[in-house]
């Protein structure tokens, strides 16, 4: 059973598999650029776009803002920016899967270039997320790392060269073959794992080019949040993803 957000229903108490999120997907992590009321306003605008354009929008606010963003939205996929593979109990300062779930998050980002994990911790974190019914997006530096991570069973792998993050230089143009190879290698391992690519996505054209190369989604952070009008910039990018997906697949 799939809800209106495009996420399969799961039962975290029974250990059922984590949610599966259908493309097209646009991911926007707020990092430390935006928080509080500003984050909620941006989330509300993203929520309208998700509903109107039928694009799954993954929105990663600061952990403390998750409940407020969840309360203000209906179609947005609210993810944590990070989660730790700790069990209930001891663990001062770590982020607990059950706490994220109960705050309203539907998933978590893992292994971003700004918060790297060991392969063992990625594996353990995916397992903890699965136990609690949370989806996982695991960031990877290369197509080869994306393929290795796909063997661990995440919902989504996000391949993005760290040297291009926040540079305005897109992997789709700066590294020919990077996107296509990520799709190919992950598909060989597990076709059910969605492949996304990002890094340096600065314009609607960059976002559309990513989708045209075969991925299930893309995303942007600094280009949106550092722009003069974040809502307008975000809108243009998500509209471009919707158009490119429709052109590539023949259906919205």
Image (spheres, rainbow, N blue to C red):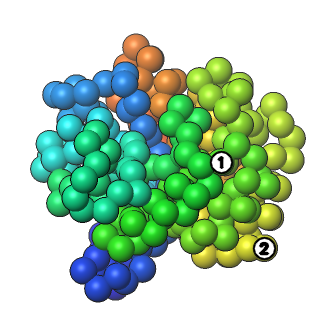
Residue 103 falls left or right of residue 95: left
Residue 251 falls left or right of residue 214: left
- The image position of residue 203, as x and y in percent, is 59, 29
Answer few, some or many: residues within 10 Å of disc 1's Cα (few below 14, many 20 plus, some between 14 and 19).
many
The residue depicted at 72 percent of the width and 62 percent of the height is 148
Residue reaching furthest to the top: 228
- The image position of residue 32, as x and y in percent, is 37, 25
Residue 75 falls left or right of residue 159: left
Answer few, some or many: residues within 10 Å of disc 2's Cα (few below 14, many 20 plus, some between 14 and 19).
few
Residue reaching furthest to the right: 176
The residue depicted at 34 percent of the width and 82 percent of the height is 15
The vertical placement of 115 against 53, above or below, is above
**Quadrant placement of the N terminus:** bottom left
Residues at circles 2 and 1 in contact by the CB criterion of under 8 Å = no
Can residue 233 be seen here? The reply is: no
The residue depicted at 62 percent of the width and 55 percent of the height is 119
Secondary structure of the residue carrying tag 2 is helix
Determine which residue is flagged by label 2. Answer: 188
- The image position of residue 172, as x and y in percent, is 75, 39
Q: CA distance from mark 2 to mark 1?
A: 17 Å
Q: How many marks?
A: 2
Q: Earlier in the sequence, mark 2 or mark 1?
A: 1
The residue depicted at 55 percent of the width and 45 percent of the height is 117
Q: Quadrant of residue 173?
A: top right
- The image position of residue 118, as x and y in percent, is 59, 49
Secondary structure of the residue carrying tag 1 is strand
Q: Nearer the viewer, mark 2 or mark 1?
A: 1
Can residue 201 be seen here? The reply is: yes
Determine which residue is flagged by label 1. Answer: 140
| Front position in the image: 176 or 112 | 112
| Front position in the image: 221 or 245 | 221
Residue 82 falls left or right of residue 170: left
């Amino acid at each position: 059973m799939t809800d209106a957000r495009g996420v399969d229903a799961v039962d975290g108490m029974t250990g059922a598999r984590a949610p599966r999120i259908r493309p097209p997907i646009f991911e926007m992590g707020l990092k430390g650029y935006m928080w509080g009321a500003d984050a909620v306003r941006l989330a509300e605008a993203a929520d309208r776009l998700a509903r109107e354009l039928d694009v799954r929008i993954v929105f990663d606010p600061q952990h403390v803002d998750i409940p407020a963003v969840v309360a203000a939205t209906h179609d947005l996929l609210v993810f944590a920016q990070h989660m730790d593979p700790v069990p209930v109990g001891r663990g001062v300062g770590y982020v607990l899967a059950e706490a994220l779930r109960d705050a309203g998050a539907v998933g978590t980002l893992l292994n971003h270039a700004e918060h790297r994990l060991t392969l063992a911790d990625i594996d353990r974190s995916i397992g903890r997320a699965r136990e609690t019914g949370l989806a996982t997006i695991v960031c990877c530096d290369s197509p080869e790392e994306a393929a290795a991570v796909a063997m661990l069973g995440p919902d989504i792998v996000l391949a993005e060269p760290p040297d291009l993050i926040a540079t305005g230089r897109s992997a789709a143009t700066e590294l020919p073959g990077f996107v296509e190879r990520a799709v190919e290698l992950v598909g060989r391992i597990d076709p059910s794992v969605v492949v996304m690519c990002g890094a340096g996505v600065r314009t609607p054209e960059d976002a559309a080019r990513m989708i045209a190369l075969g991925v299930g989604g893309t995303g942007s952070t600094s280009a949106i949040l550092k722009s003069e009008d974040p809502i307008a910039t975000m809108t243009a990018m998500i509209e471009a993803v919707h158009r490119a997906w429709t052109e590539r697949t023949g259906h919205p």
